[in-house]
Image (tube, rainbow, N blue to C red):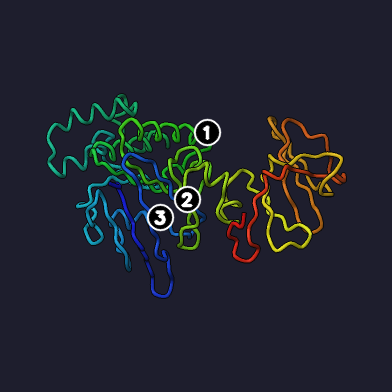
Amino acid sequence: MSAIELEAVAKHWGESRALDGITFSAELGTFVVLLGPSGCGKSTTLRLIAGLDQPTSGTIRIAGRDVTRLPPAARGIAMVFQSYALFPHLSVAENIVFGLKVRKVPDRDAKLKRVADMLGLEKLLHRKPSQLSGGQQQRVALGRAIIAEAPVCLMDEPLSNLDAQLRGEMRREIRQLQQRLGITMVYVTHDQTEAMTMADRVVLLKDGRIEQVGSPEELYERPATAFTASFLGAPPMNLLRLNGAATLTGVRPEDIRFGAAGLEARVESVEYLGADTLVAARAAEQVFLVRVAGRAEVRGGETVHAAWDSQHEHHFDANTGRRST
């Protein structure tokens, strides 16, 4: 049985369609990421699962139970917000146990100790949120979510307020915590690095519709659409129209090499990144990127020839964007 199921779920705001009949499921104990650009419907989807908004149509089930019209408190979920939503006048300990206290749950002190030990908050329990770093506030928000022992946890861009290094540390901590507790987690982000490194399954959204669902490897290695191909990857896949073809040829930057023969192009820029170099080259009216290990032996303005092996090609219909081969 799936932990979460959405069946033909739509959400309309007047004439605007935030979600247009999406269907997917999250299996028990899995980490599912809702990924996509701003305005694609991912946060709306999370709010519908949480019960903070009501769908225009469709069905939402949690643990096999239809919760489509139930209030948030009746859904058996926990949620971590982008802003952390901590009470500034309460201590760390009081923030973590707040929900338990409201519901008069017994053994709050024992539960608090277990969660504080798990998240490394033992020495911070008497502090107020204003006395904490961003990463510490994030741990408090996590603690408040997991102390409820809900089998489903929803997270809405929880790392967007942190700097790059701390985001990397918190990615690992959240993933390890989810695996250790065995909870089902649905996580919203526009950051494809978070999706690729954390998810068991990725639900990629575009304009309120699902573009592709699968493991990070499936989306990266066999994108179903040109949008998927161009959204995933740092840098993303090159999409080239070669010789006026009706299809777009997709090639990852790391699969292209410079040599004596191949597509003739002019080097526009060279970015040395240490471990590798990104080269932007122009062929006719198309710019494409090449990732070269170490330092590239090319310079701006130079004419080069780019080639790749046929097994690294992906082909998409130029009109629909759907994968053709």
Question: Separation of disc 1 and disc 2 at Cα?
Answer: 21 Å
Residue 154 placement (x, y as % from top left) = 34, 46
Residue positioned 77% across, 41% down in the render: 270
| Dot placed on the residue nearer the N-terminal end, 3 or 2 | 2
Residue 274 placement (x, y as % from top left) = 70, 30
Residue beneath label 2, please?
35
Quadrant hosting residue 319 = bottom right
Residue beneath label 1, please?
165
Residue beneath label 3, please?
43
| Dot placed on the residue nearer the N-terminal end, 3 or 1 | 3
Question: Separation of disc 3 and disc 2 at Cα?
Answer: 10 Å
Residue positioned 45% across, 36% down in the render: 171
For the residues bearing labels 3 and 2, Cβ distance under 8 angstroms: no
- Mark 3 residue type: Ser
Residue 190 falls left or right of residue 69: right
Q: Residues within 10 Å of mark 2 (few under 14, many from 20)?
A: many
Residue 66 falls left or right of residue 223: left
Q: Secondary structure at mark 2?
A: strand
